[in-house]
Amino acid sequence: MESLPLLCVAVPLLVAAGLAAVGRWLPRPVVDVVSLLSCLGVLGLGVTLLVATGSRRVVSWVAGYTPHGGASVGVVFVVDRVGAGLAVLVAALMTGALLYTWRYFSEVESKFHVLMLLFLAGMAGFALTGDLFDAFVFFELMGAVAYALTGYKIEEAQPLQGALNFAVVNSLGAYCTLLGIGLLYGRTGELGFAQIHQALAGHGPPDALVVVGAALVLTGFLVKAAAVPFHFWLADAHAVAPSPVCVLFSGVMVELGLYGVARTWSAALSAALPAERLRPALLVGGVVTALVASVMCLAQTHLKRLLAFSTMAHMGLFLVALGALEPASVGGLLVYVLGHAGVKGALFLCAGLLLNHHGSLDAEELYGRGREMPVTRVCFLVGALALAGLPPSGTWLGKTLSEDGLSHAGYGWAPALFVATSALTGAAVLRVGLQIFLGVGERPGSAEDTRGRHEDSETGALLSRLPATMVGPAVTLLGVGVALGMVPGLGRVAEQAAQTLLDGGGYAAATLHGAVGVHAPASDVTGFTASGVVLGLVSVALALAVAAAQLYSRRLPAPVRAVGVALRPPLRILRATHSGHLGDYVVWLLLGVTLLAGAIAVS
Amino acid sequence: MTLLPYLVAGWLFLAGCYGLVTSRNLVHAVGCLTIAQSSTYVLLLAVGYRSGATAPVFGDLPVGAPVVDPVVQALTLTDIVVSATVTALLLALTLQIHKRHGTVDPDELRALRN
Amino acid sequence: MSRRARLAMFAVVAAALGAALVLALLGLPRFGSAFHPYGDRAVAVAVGPQQTANVVGSVTFDQRGVDTLGEEFILFGSVIGALVLLRPAPEEREVGVRGAGRVMSSTGLAGYLLLPISLLVGGYIVAHGAVSPGGGFQGGVILASGWHLLYVAGRYAALRRLVPNKPLELAEAVGGAAFAAIGVAGIGVAGVFLVNLLPKGSLGSLLSAGTVPVLNGAVGVEVTSGVVLLLASFLDQAVVLRSIEEADE
């Protein structure tokens, strides 16, 4: 059992190296099958870990350097239910993504698959490790490979610039994390989460070093999680990366940034920084992210950029749910992440299907042309409704659980924020879905930049018939995302998992002293409350209303249109900040670090 | 001055960021990113220093002699080689940008404005 | 943002961040302090049970070996990624190496003389990673740069013939796989990933420290091939690849 976490990392690494060595001589189907099998292997290992972590954390000291007297020289992998669940999610999404690429992306022989498997290994390692520097190493692994995957389409100008912005901003964030690790190492002399926790405990209020060190370490993870003001890279990268890669970006990579924040705080920093210090920063950051992203989302016509901003809006909601640092809301967050991964993954694959069939990602150009794609149409529109929070989908369940958890923790404004954000992002996705697949509404005409016109299809020539290997994963991901809401007891399991995640003392005891730990107290949350269902239906109704307003904007009554006109100047300013200019992004990043440090210091 | 090595690390980081913010050439920007990264090395190695101690290699040294911290050295040396290859990745992107856009001036790259 | 706005905003933010950093740095232990608990433990383990004279090598390949596994694969992934990004575009073709221009004969001579010396030094550093400063990463970089003395000496065509891409990609993958395979073998033999299985020998001798020299070798092969591949793909962009219109001139 103790070897399983390391096998989750080592197996994809070995298979990737093997494919890189002999891939050019293997027939393409063999490469596809081998990669799929290794993903399924990791999936199986992850599920085994998921089952085993119901009652304890799986602690694995690499190379056998077990601790003596609470100290060790080795690196430890500590897996609890959340870590195992994330590893399962990564493997499942990767399986779907690789199935989608069946037979395509062959210009580079097997290198695309090599990069995807390395991406899998990096994400799995990040989710499972118990050492802060090791987490940084896997963070860099997932980053470096992601930059290359984003810039894959070298024949076009946009992917390269998007990939470079992504690479520089995320790298700078990672270097901030490393600076923070250096500061904390100078104070504690340790690199593992549990060891840092032990060394920081019992020293009273944190001084400047701990505050700034914590802010720096969390910065890299918040950059990955695309929280405002670290978020500018996300839309640039998502708009241009190949569709299967976008599935992974939106489904799990940005969520891993949030996991990094949660894990680092609870397992290491909570000894010196009580929850009250971090809550304001996370809550405010989450609210601003959700609102900014929702507004930007409504203004897009490029399909993938729109979906990217909707991911960012949901990340804002996730950040708020995390920010309360309470098991109830964090449990809801976990369910919401799972539901969102399925739904958003399906939407990105549908976008890819549109691209491969019609050669465009622009809502204006695609107006009405999706009518002959029945399966994709249903998939996309159902996905849009699920994003808006239609009961009983997985996204609705996560939303309800988070709203309840936050209200009980005293944040009564949270349901309103959740309803508004899901409604606005759902409206944007519904709007393009109705325009493209049903030709509803007035023909759009816009003068914004960043068009998705005449993009090269990802499959070489345009496909006249969409293969089952492409449509199947989209439908399956959507099905799972929607069906998740109907799994009995999911809310309870999630809340218990959240309890274990937030228990820093238990983490340290299990890692350094082999303590088995107590079962998390059983919760009685179900999610199927009347208020939850009502709020879900309200979100959907609002989404339909906003979508209709955008689709039929010329028929709206004059007062409503006047409001729309009045909002244009601030909107233009907001859109101008998303300039695509690297220097701007770096300044915003530095501002974010400073604000985060300030927020932690004064709370 | 016992604070100077640490201040050098901080200065390097901010200087690298200044270069990134004001850069007119993406190749220069990638170089500035490397400078920002080198600040992390200086900090780690400065934290690991011990007065009156020597390199942690016991070939000729008697066992038990004071040595500097080997852990940060291990972290730094692997990181340096890795950062060289990641820089290569970024420069590959820059090279292709030059081919597609005809320029490497961030002020002139307009493809992603929104 | 306009340049001036960006610069003004940066000035304000950098001042604030700089002040915060200085406050934080003041909290660090005095430069040269003796507080290194992890370092002391690592030294004790390296010279004790693991008989590794180069403690940094012990930490890199034994005590924190999984970090190095990750870093090695970052290198691997970056090289593969750079190869993917620098692949010939549909409208480009290889037209053979363009002439080197004038290279001074003294430069050529220096290149030829230094090539075997650097290869020897690089190989030595890789092999002695467990007993003296050095190891796979450092030696690998020296080996890779040694090959490129041929480029400096104006013999790029000879370099491309001597080190073609396909064997290099194979070597790089084998180097990476070897590290991961040794790790997995640890699970098979002793139930623990990356455990140091081989006999430890005695402190300071060439065959000591168990698996550390083997892992050094694997990393050396991987770094050498990876860096040569990287340099080759960049040089190809400059010297070999031409867009079809130019090639027809």
Image: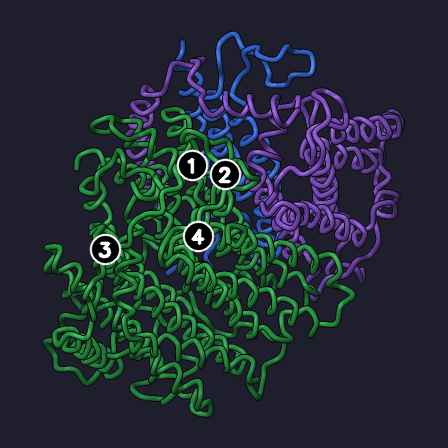
Chain colours: A green, B blue, C purple
Q: Quadrant of the C terminus of chain C?
A: bottom right
Q: Is residue B51 left or right of residue A585?
A: right
Mark 2, other Cα within 10 Å: few <14 / some 14–19 / many ≥20? many
Q: Which mark is residue A75?
A: 2
- Determine the CA span between mark 4 and mark 3: 19 Å
Q: Position of residue A39 (x, y in %)?
A: 56, 65
Q: Is residue C162 visible?
A: yes
- Between C131 and A394, which is closer to the camera in this rendering? C131
Which residue does the image show at 56% across and 74% down from the upper left?
A99
Which residue does the image show at 23% across and 51% down from the upper left?
A323
Q: Which residue is mark 4?
A: A127
Q: Amino acid at mark 1?
A: Gly
Q: Which residue is mark 3?
A: A327
Q: Position of residue A140 (x, y in %)?
A: 50, 46
Q: Amino acid at mark 4?
A: Ala
Question: In this rendering, is residue C44 above or below B40?
Answer: above
- Between B16 and B3, which is closer to the camera in this rendering? B3
State which tag comes first along the sequence, 4 or 1.
4
- Determine the CA span between mark 4 and mark 2: 14 Å
Write down the chain letter for disc 2: A
Write down the chain letter for disc 3: A
Q: Which residue is mark 1?
A: A192
Q: Are marks 2 and 3 on the same chain?
A: yes
Q: The residue tagged with tag 3: helix, strand or loop?
A: helix
